[in-house]
């Protein structure tokens, strides 16, 4: 949707007849910045690789996944193990 060759901005430029410069939204710019920053750090990259391996391990078996969910429910304020998406931005408008 934000591609400068085939996205919404390009289609609107064709309709209106003006060639506007491509400016990605701030959320996508921030996502790109964070992604490249994490990739630059070997420690952070290994952390995300380990978390991804844990997710794959527990999600590949319903028995293991159920056991993990049971144990997480016993821990007050525990986090949820989720798949790390490399193609989708996950954002929250408010933080607790």
Image (tube, rainbow, N blue to C red):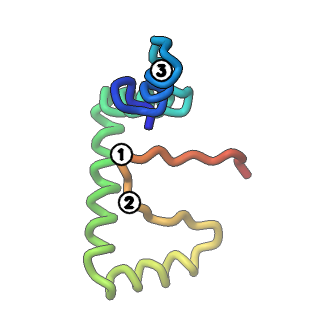
Mark 2 vs 1: CB contact within 8 A: no
Q: Looking at the image, is mark 2 or mark 3 earlier in the sequence?
A: 3
In this rendering, is residue 83 above or below 92? below
Report the residue marked by disc 3: 13
- Looking at the rendered structure, the secondary structure element under dot 1 is loop
Q: CA distance from mark 2 to mark 3?
A: 37 Å
Q: Quadrant of residue 45?
A: top left
Q: Quadrant of residue 77?
A: bottom right
Q: CA distance from mark 3 to mark 1?
A: 26 Å
Report the residue marked by disc 1: 87
In this rendering, is residue 96 above or below 12? below
Closer to viewer: mark 2 or mark 3: 3
The residue located at (38%, 53%) in the rendering is 84
Closer to viewer: mark 3 or mark 1: 3
Check disc 2: other Cα within 10 Å, few if <14, some if 14-19, many if 20+: few
Q: Is residue 26 left or right of residue 10?
A: right
**Count of marks overlaid on the render:** 3
The residue located at (37%, 80%) in the rendering is 65
Closer to viewer: mark 2 or mark 1: 1
The residue located at (41%, 85%) in the rendering is 66
Report the residue marked by disc 2: 83
Mark 3 vs 1: CB contact within 8 A: no
- Looking at the rendered structure, the secondary structure element under dot 2 is loop
Check disc 1: other Cα within 10 Å, few if <14, some if 14-19, many if 20+: few
x and y percentages locating residue 11 in the rendered image: 44, 29
x and y percentages locating residue 70 in the rendered image: 49, 84
Q: Looking at the image, is mark 3 or mark 1 earlier in the sequence?
A: 3
């Amino acid at each position: 949707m934000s591609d400068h060759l085939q996205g919404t901005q390009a289609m609107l430029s064709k309709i209106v007849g003006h060639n506007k410069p491509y400016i990605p939204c701030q959320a996508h710019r921030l996502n790109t910045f964070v992604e490249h920053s994490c990739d630059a750090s070997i420690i952070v990259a290994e952390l995300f690789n380990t978390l991804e391996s844990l997710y794959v391990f527990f999600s590949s078996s319903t028995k293991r996944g159920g056991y993990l969910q049971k144990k997480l429910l016993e821990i007050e304020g525990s986090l949820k193990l989720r798949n790390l998406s490399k193609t989708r931005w996950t954002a929250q408008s408010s933080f607790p």
